[in-house]
């Protein structure tokens, strides 16, 4: 449909994909340029990451979340958190295993499960529960058979946060049923009020938990492919065992740039938060004028919007594209429970977002 609309000569504004439009911060690019010139970095990297990169990751999570991990055994580098999320299933999901997967959610949690012969059990994230899964609604036999639970807050696509209290309930549930908890914290630094917590800060989480981190959204580095996982030794070890046999780690020069990012000045990250806040407020005001119900945007750079009566996720998405040339993502693309919502991304230049907002003003719903 997008191609069809573009062929009519419409200037399409895409608010569909969550890929930061701002460049990687200059001090990180400089670190890569210097590191790329060093012959020592031209050889195979260690799959688990340079000790200095893992130490930088450990120092970052200690300072930011108050979580202490041993860089030697409780940190592994990742070629982007997506790689780790997919390989987590290779490491721990066997045919017939049940995996608890949030719906709506980042698709790789469920697809990784399916690729490895597991069965996803979908946990609906409902508006009335502030988009947290209702642990009490998980049937006892499912909880008994479940091997792993996926969670991700700040949440893509709902923009919700989880509180330390919710994470404490998850730890209790997971210990009771002997379930591994894999928490995706890819958006930890994209927030608007209180900084979101780490799952691993919950008491007892280190016994059952692993957490995925990414430099992609924090430092505008989606194309660089760098992240890391922290957590329980056996879980990090299992993921690492897969990785030794599947990939050969991240180009060391990129790891050196990652050290510059994690260990360097974090003021540019605060600058990005201010930029997303400005864009969020611009879009929320336009949606309110249209009478559309946007959910509270507490983290991430997404806005999750309820579709009005008479529309579905896809019919409203189609209307926005065909009538005003604005691309959004239908909520149903994130799972059946995403039906009835659409997702806007704030990762376009503010002037383009302003243009999209003006076009929204001409829409009749
Ligand atoms: C919820 C979530 N997790 C993980 C990722 C993967 O990010 P990366 O592989 O760039 O670290 C994304 C990317 O869009 C995401 O939205």
Image: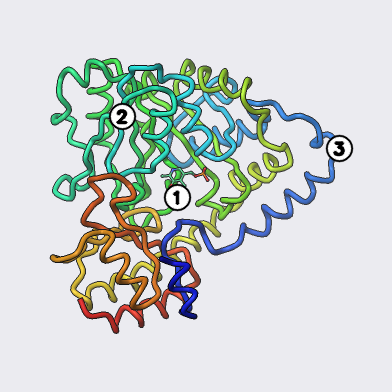
Between disc 3 and disc 1, the foreground one is 3
Separation of disc 3 and disc 2 at Cα?
Answer: 45 Å
Note whether 326 is above or below 102 in the view shown: below
Dot placed on the residue nearer the N-terminal end, 3 or 2: 3
| Residue shown at 47% from the left, 63% from the top | 347
Q: Nearer the viewer, residue 327 or 295?
A: 327
Marks 2 and 1: in contact by CB < 8 Å?
no
Q: Look at mark 3 in the image and give the residue it sits on.
A: 39
Identify the disc placed on residue 45: none
Say left or right for 115 vs 122: right
Mark 2 is surrounded, within 10 Å at the Cα level, by few (under 14), some (14 to 19) or many (20 or more) other residues, namely many
Placement of the N terminus among the 4 image quadrants: bottom left
Residue found at the very far right of the displayed protein: 39
Say left or right for 306 vs 227: left
Disc 1 CB within 8 Å of nearest ligand 1 atom: no
Residue at disc 3, secondary structure:
helix
* Residue 48, percent from left and from top: 62, 26
* Residue 234, percent from left and from top: 47, 15
Disc 2 CB within 8 Å of nearest ligand 1 atom: no
Dot placed on the residue nearer the N-terminal end, 1 or 2: 2
Separation of disc 3 and disc 1 at Cα?
Answer: 33 Å
Say left or right for 295 vs 93: left
Mark 3 is surrounded, within 10 Å at the Cα level, by few (under 14), some (14 to 19) or many (20 or more) other residues, namely few
Q: Look at mark 1 in the image and give the residue it sits on.
A: 189
Q: Look at mark 2 in the image and give the residue it sits on.
A: 120
| Residue shown at 24% from the left, 63% from the top | 294
Dot placed on the residue nearer the N-terminal end, 3 or 1: 3
Between disc 1 and disc 2, the foreground one is 2
Q: How is the image coloured?
A: rainbow
């Amino acid at each position: 449909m997008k191609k069809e609309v573009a062929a009519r000569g419409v200037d399409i504004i895409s608010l569909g994909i969550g890929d930061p439009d701002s460049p990687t911060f200059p001090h990180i690019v400089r670190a890569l340029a210097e590191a790329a010139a060093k012959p020592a970095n031209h050889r195979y990297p260690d799959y688990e990451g340079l000790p200095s990169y893992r130490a930088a990751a450990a120092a970052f999570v200690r300072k930011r979340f108050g979580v202490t991990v041993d860089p030697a055994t409780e940190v592994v580098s990742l070629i982007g958190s997506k790689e780790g999320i997919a390989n987590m299933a290779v490491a721990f999901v066997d045919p017939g295993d049940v995996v608890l997967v949030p719906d709506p959610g980042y698709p790789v949690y469920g697809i990784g499960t399916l690729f490895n012969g597991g069965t996803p059990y979908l946990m609906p994230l409902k508006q009335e529960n502030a988009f947290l899964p209702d642990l009490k609604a998980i049937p006892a036999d499912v909880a008994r058979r479940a091997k792993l639970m996926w969670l991700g807050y700040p949440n893509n696509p709902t923009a919700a946060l989880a509180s330390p209290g919710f994470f404490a309930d998850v730890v209790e549930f997971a210990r009771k049923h002997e379930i591994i908890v894999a928490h995706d914290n890819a958006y930890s630094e994209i927030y608007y009020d209180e900084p979101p917590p780490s799952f691993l800060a919950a008491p007892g989480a280190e016994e059952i938990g692993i957490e995925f981190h990414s430099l992609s959204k924090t430092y505008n580095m989606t194309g660089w492919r760098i992240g890391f996982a922290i957590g329980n030794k056996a879980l990090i070890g299992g993921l690492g065992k897969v990785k030794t046999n599947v990939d050969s780690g991240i180009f060391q020069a990129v790891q050196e740039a990652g050290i510059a990012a994690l260990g360097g000045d974090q003021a540019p990250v605060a600058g990005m938060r201010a930029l997303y806040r400005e864009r969020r407020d611009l879009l929320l005001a336009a949606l309110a004028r249209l009478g559309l119900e946007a959910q509270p945007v507490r983290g991430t750079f997404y806005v999750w919007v309820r579709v009005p009566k008479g529309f579905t996720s896809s019919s409203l998405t189609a209307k926005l594209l065909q009538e005003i040339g604005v691309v959004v993502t239908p909520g149903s693309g994130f799972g059946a429970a995403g039906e009835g919502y659409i997702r806007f991304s704030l990762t376009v230049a503010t002037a383009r977002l302003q243009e999209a907002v003006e076009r929204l003003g001409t829409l009749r719903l």
